[in-house]
Image (cartoon, rainbow, N blue to C red):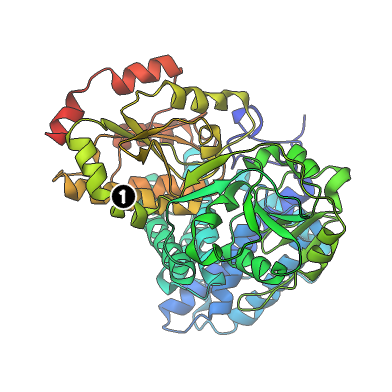
Amino acid sequence: MENKMFCYQCQETAGCTGCTQMGVCGKNPTVAALQDLLIYVSKGISSITTQLRKENKPVSQDINHLVTLNLFITITNANFDEKAIEDRIVFSLEKKRELIEQVSDKNALKPAAFWYTENREDFLPKAKTVGVLATENEDIRSLRELTIYGLKGLSAYSKHANALLEDNEEVDAFLQRALDTTLDDTLSVEQLIELVLETGKYGVDGMALLDKANTGAYGSPEMTTVNIGVGTNPGILISGHDLRDMEMLLKQTEGTGVDVYTHSEMLPAHYYPAFKKYKHFVGNYGNAWWKQKEEFESFNGPILMTTNCIVPPKASYKDRLFTTGSAGFPGCKHIKGEIGEEKDFSEIIELAKKCAAPKEIESGEIVGGFAHNQVFALADKIVDAVKNGDIKKFIVMAGCDGRVKSRSYYTDFAKALPKDTVILTAGCAKYRYNKLGLGDINGIPRVLDAGQCNDSYSLAVIALKLTEIFGCKSINELPIIYNIAWYEQKAVIVLLALLYLGVKNIHLGPTLPAFLSPNVANVLVKNFGIAGIGSVEDDMKLFFGDKTDTEEVVA
């Protein structure tokens, strides 16, 4: 059967080899092709901006933001709207045509810099020539795509920081230089491996930028008890990752009689001091992104998707689903608003007033807010617990959740953990175990939730601090296990960031990425000890069969 498309950027890609007829995420071949073309056009722009910087010419923030948002739009489950992506290509082509006139040495530019058309009918034929499979060599393709997927994750962090008026020119310049580099057919496998690791370095910088933006605007996350039940007022459900959108929605709903609830990755908004003053900020509704069809149905009110993680909606609630930022779905109202602008959510609020209150699907509370600042506040308590043997190991179980049945492994793994272990988590993977009631150790919860996938930075900072406290020579001497679940490209940049920081022996599941060729996978195994997951029973023996390392560290 002839391929109608090719995409293998997410964990659930068909057969763990690639989606060729329709995306498992729900995107059709046309959307897939347009996203491929948008990436190609962004590479062309990046070829120009990289050369401009070499010529000591300025590149505006607007252009940096353009490239960043273009990449974000192509992240898994972000934007399914053909027209919106086409419009983005048209806009980007016009900007590219303006930029190229500023370049003195046009001979230094890649062919992608010169491609231009005013005819939208040219888009799909061109897309067929610039997709993933355009790179024939399997290993080169693998390393290029590993870099690009890392850059997509980096773009997400940059975009959220940009929304809070924080920029890092070095991160932007690297992102564009790396995109340009993926067009270079002269590079060896070794050189591309170096680029992959460099992407990890800037991944750390991007996460630090976002951490600064979020904490500067809203305060440092603090230990917080979050309600998972419902009130009696009508509500708006906000999902995704963008805290600036969260802030605007809370301000505009104040005093309207409409409550606000978080869903999935927006849960950590409850941990920020700035949002706690809103009495109508009721709690968290539901679980991870993939359960949204049934949870959006029962919520009754409108839903605002601020970023990715959209599942193609059911007709029964599609007219209640709104998108903004990088997100989009055909037939759903899109709320516009550029960086620095105030978005108008009045239409969502008016609709909410006409809707029934949410149907309760759970009750009780969950605890989170353990970003690095809060954990440092508990440092003495944690250190004492480790030194006296009450805490034997930490398990980093950050990352993404997903639909495949094999992800029940993470729930069973958490249940099977020895009582003297503590889980460090961030991202929607936590929904596999954050409601299990795993208890605490000397008042320290056994699940320390740092926040969104973006907040994985906190886990790295915590690990580095523990390395210092215990006088370890490297992060790998700590009593920490890395057992990370992945789904999309933000998890990829987290992985690359950890590799850059020197973390070894990371276990990644439920499957290894399809975009890793056998040779590239072998490099990661040989140099970094990357491994998959086994059965819960086998992994318990692997991780806890020998206590010697722990005893040495804490002695």
Task: Between residue 207 and residue 446, name the one nearer to us.
Answer: 446
> Is any part of residue 190 visible from this angle?
no
Please tell me whether mark 1 sits on a helix, a strand or a loop: helix
Q: Which residue is mark 1?
A: 462
Q: Is residue 88 above or below residue 504?
A: below
Spot occupied by residue 144 in the image (x, y as percentages of width and height): 50, 49
How far across and how far down the image is residue 222, in percent? 42, 56
Q: Residue at x 61, y 71 (%)?
A: 66
> Which quarter of the rendered picture does the C terminus lie within?
top left
Can the viewer see residue 229? yes
In this view, the residue in front, 131 or 90, is: 90
Q: Position of residue 38 (x, y in %)?
A: 67, 60
Between residue 263 and residue 523, name the one nearer to us: 263
Q: Residue at x 57, y 63 (%)?
A: 243
Q: Quadrant of residue 419?
A: top left
Name the residue furthest left.
555
**Above or below, comparing residue 388 to residue 217 in the picture:** above
In-front residue for pair 130/154: 154
